[in-house]
Image: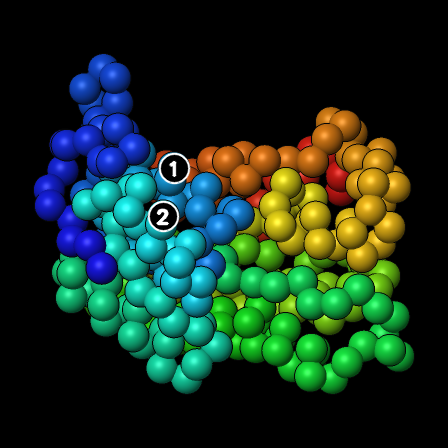
């Protein structure tokens, strides 16, 4: 693990915690927990948040990728390798972040898996259970641990990664679709509970994004033909970039979104228009 050593200096990516004009970053002096941080959207968010001055606790079960990311970000980031479905996982990362930084200002509950591509009658029960554990149980554990910590600190922001699959039906991805609907329900209830104490809770709902997950889904559905069909359904004519999702997450995590809670925020190139 790595310790944060103060604001204002450059990290190992050469990114300073102040912008080119010398003003403070949008997350300066804020501590942020990111689950599923090692790859894809989580990695892009960690990189962007570090550039905006955040002190990060990066959480993932992929130890090698996690350590590589923490090493690139330098003293802005510490890492914690664990499985977010374990009973004590959320308590562990909450306590670690509080021990290092004194409080938690924002959290991205981003860990997720796609499972298999199969019609409902053929879907393996073990895969269903694992998917629901990662995509739903881990979010519930995170909310149960983070909400009290943020309430005690006077407020905060929790951003949950859902999907456009949480807003509509998707054939052959029924458990994934159900899980992404479920976290929207968790978000809305948690937003109600957190609001009196200044804790905001929202979901970001990406469409197809250039990550390992969408590549895996396309491969299972026929490769390039699936990709071309997917792009054809997007008015902007392409898959999104992880950095574009991270930009929306940054807004919701920052004080700029101080009146935003209990809602879904879509970044999908117009797919659900």
Alpha carbons under labels 2 and 1: distance apart: 12 Å
Mark 2: give few (<14), some (14-19) or many (20+) Cα within 10 Å. many
Query: Where in the figure is residue 178, as x and y percent of width and height?
Result: 71, 69
Residue bearing mark 2: 69
Residue 270 or 176: which is nearer the viewer?
176
Q: Nearer the viewer, mark 2 or mark 1?
A: 2
Secondary structure type for disc 1: helix
Left or right? Give the position of 203 relative to 254.
right
Left or right? Give the position of 102 relative to 234.
left
Residue 3 or 102: which is nearer the viewer?
3
Query: Where in the figure is residue 188, as x and y percent of width and height?
Result: 54, 63
Of label 2 and label 1, which has the lower sequence position?
1
**The C terminus lies in quadrant:** top right
Query: Where in the figure is residue 52, as x and y percent of width and height?
Result: 30, 34
Residue bearing mark 1: 48
In the picture as drawn, the residue positioned furthest to the front comes out as 64
Left or right? Give the position of 146 relative to 165.
left
Secondary structure type for disc 2: helix
Query: Where in the figure is residue 107, as x and y percent of width and height?
Result: 37, 56
Q: Residue at image x 23%, y 43%?
A: 74
Residue 238 or 157: which is nearer the viewer?
238
**The N terminus lies in quadrant:** bottom left
Q: Is residue 183 above or below residue 273?
A: below
Picture disc at residue 122: none
In the picture as drawn, the residue positioned furthest to the top comes out as 21
Q: Residue at image x 59%, y 35%?
A: 241
Q: Quick check: can you spot residue 125?
A: yes
Q: Residue at image x 30%, y 50%?
A: 70
Q: Residue at image x 29%, y 75%?
A: 92
Q: Quick check: can you spot residue 196?
A: no
């Amino acid at each position: 693990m790595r310790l944060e050593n103060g604001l204002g200096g450059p990290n190992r990516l050469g990114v300073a915690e102040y912008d080119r004009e010398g003003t403070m970053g949008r997350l300066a002096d804020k501590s942020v927990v990111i689950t599923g941080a090692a790859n894809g959207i989580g990695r892009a968010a960690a990189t962007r948040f570090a550039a905006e001055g955040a002190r990060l606790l990066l959480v993932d079960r992929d130890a090698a990728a996690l350590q590589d990311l923490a090493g690139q970000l330098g003293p802005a980031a510490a890492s914690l390798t664990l499985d977010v479905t374990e009973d004590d996982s959320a308590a562990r990362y909450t306590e670690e972040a509080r021990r290092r930084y004194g409080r938690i200002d924002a959290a991205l509950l981003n860990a997720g898996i796609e499972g298999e591509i199969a019609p409902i009658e053929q879907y393996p029960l073990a895969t269903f259970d694992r998917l629901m554990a990662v995509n739903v149980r881990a979010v519930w554990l995170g909310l149960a641990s983070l909400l009290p910590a943020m309430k005690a600190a006077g407020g905060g922001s929790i951003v949950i990664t859902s999907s456009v699959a949480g807003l509509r039906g998707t054939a052959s991805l029924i458990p994934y679709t159900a899980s992404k609907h479920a976290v929207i329900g968790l978000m809305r209830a948690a937003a109600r509970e957190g609001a009196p104490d200044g804790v905001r809770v929202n979901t970001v709902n990406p469409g197809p994004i250039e990550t390992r997950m969408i590549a895996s889904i396309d491969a299972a559905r026929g490769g390039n033909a699936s990709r071309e069909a997917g792009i054809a359904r997007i008015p902007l004519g392409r898959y999104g970039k992880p950095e574009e999702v991270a930009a929306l997450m940054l807004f919701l995590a920052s004080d700029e979104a101080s009146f935003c809670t209990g809602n879904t925020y879509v970044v999908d190139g117009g797919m659900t228009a």
